[in-house]
Image (cartoon, rainbow, N blue to C red):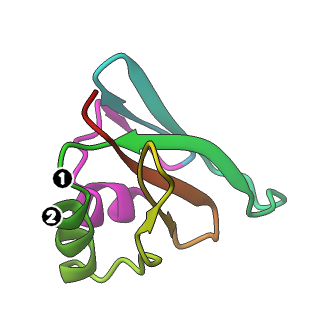
Amino acid sequence: MILFWKDKIGLKPSREANTWSEFPLENIVIALLQDKDALPKRTGIVFEVNDINETVERLKAKGVKVDEINDIGFGLLTFFKDPEGNEYEIFQPRPY
């Protein structure tokens, strides 16, 4: 998972260990805890971007499987999963 967040998503860890790693991202920290009993789930984590098409192409070029982009009226939305099956959203809001 550490390699996924570093190499595929492009985040830089502030702490990296066997059972706990942290990736700061503006005002939040994505923390990875090794847990063999954890089940994949929809995380509720949304990455808001300025250009969803560029972001999707960059992720696909690194081998990340990204769903089709959907127009949801107030913006564009798609999903991707990490290697353990956890789901994340990518969202580009419409300008007001």
How far apart are the two marked residues, 1 and 2, measured between alpha carbons?
5 Å
- Identify which residue is drawn at 40% across, 56% down: 2
Above or below — where is 40 with respect to 10? below
| Residue 46 or residue 16, whichever sits in front | 46
> Residue 54 has which mark?
2
Q: Mark 2 and mark 1 in contact (Cβ < 8 Å)?
A: yes
Q: Which residues are magenta?
A: 2-18
Q: Quadrant of residue 56?
A: bottom left
Where residue 70 appears, x then y in whole percent? Answer: 46, 67
Looking at the rendering, in which quadrant would you find the C terminus? top left
Task: Give percent across and percent down for residue 63.
Answer: 30, 83
Q: Decide: is 16 above or below 35.
A: above
Label 1 belongs to which residue?
Answer: 51
Tell which of 17 and 84 is nearer to you: 84
Residue 95 among those drawn in magenta: no
Is residue 9 located in the magenta-colored stretch of the structure?
Answer: yes
Left or right side of 62 for 87: right
Residue 53 in the image: state x and y as whole percent.
21, 66
